[in-house]
Image (cartoon, rainbow, N blue to C red):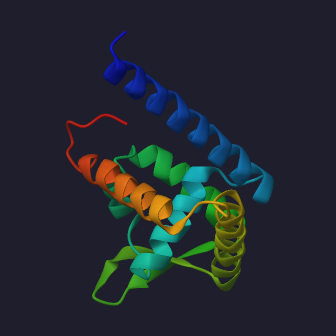
Amino acid sequence: MAHRDESVATIQRELTAFARRARATAARMHPELSLVSFTLLAHLEDQQGCRATDLAAHYLLDKSTVSRQVATLQRLGLVERRVDPDDQRVQVLHLTAAGAETLAQVAASRLAAFQERLADWNEADLSRFADYLLRYNGAAQDPSADG
């Protein structure tokens, strides 16, 4: 196998391991919430609310998947539906106070974990890693880019 192919295989393997750890960490932080749920909560906070169809479109998820996630979030009291003041036919999802608090706790725990894991990295390595992640995720904006 060529060196480039070996490097790509290593990147794929390590990103898969990262994703598995992220899902496991999410489950430990709040056993009833998936990593997708935390992602949806963060998006609702960033957008100050949005429709379920907007969540599905933004994350390229099936509407039924988003519907199940939202139902769980509502049952847990983390999300509520409000009528859109501009269009009474539309319901907009918003974080509840409990949802905002849960999200803040998870974000603080995740940040602490990243800081601990990267504590012995120098500034140049951190900067390069951040730039590489931005570049990699930027390429994912292309619908033809995989994973």
Number of numbered discs on residues: 0
Q: Residue at x 41, y 20 (%)?
A: 6
| 77 relative to 40 in the view: left or right | right
Q: Is 93 above or below relative to 58? A: below
Q: Residue 42: tell me if it is visible.
A: yes
Front residue of this view, candidates 41 and 14: 14
| 1 relative to 102 in the view: left or right | left
Front residue of this view, candidates 51 and 132: 132
Q: Residue at x 43, y 64 (%)?
A: 127
| 6 relative to 116 in the view: left or right | left
Q: Quadrant of the C terminus?
A: top left
Q: Is 86 above or below relative to 105? A: below
Picture quadrant where residue 134 is located: bottom left
Image coords of residue 47 (percent x, y) = 39, 78
Q: Residue 56: tell me if it is visible.
A: no
Front residue of this view, candidates 4 and 103: 4
Q: Is 57 above or below relative to 104? A: above
| 112 relative to 94 in the view: left or right | right
Q: Is 36 above or below relative to 78? A: above
Q: Residue at x 27, y 54 (%)?
A: 138
Image coords of residue 137 (percent x, y) = 34, 51
Image coords of residue 14 (percent x, y) = 54, 34
Q: Which residue ends up furthest to the top in the rendered image? A: 1
Q: Quadrant of the N terminus?
A: top left
Image coords of residue 4 (percent x, y) = 32, 24
Picture quadrant where residue 114 is located: bottom right
Picture quadrant where residue 121 is located: bottom right
Q: Residue at x 63, y 63 (%)?
A: 73
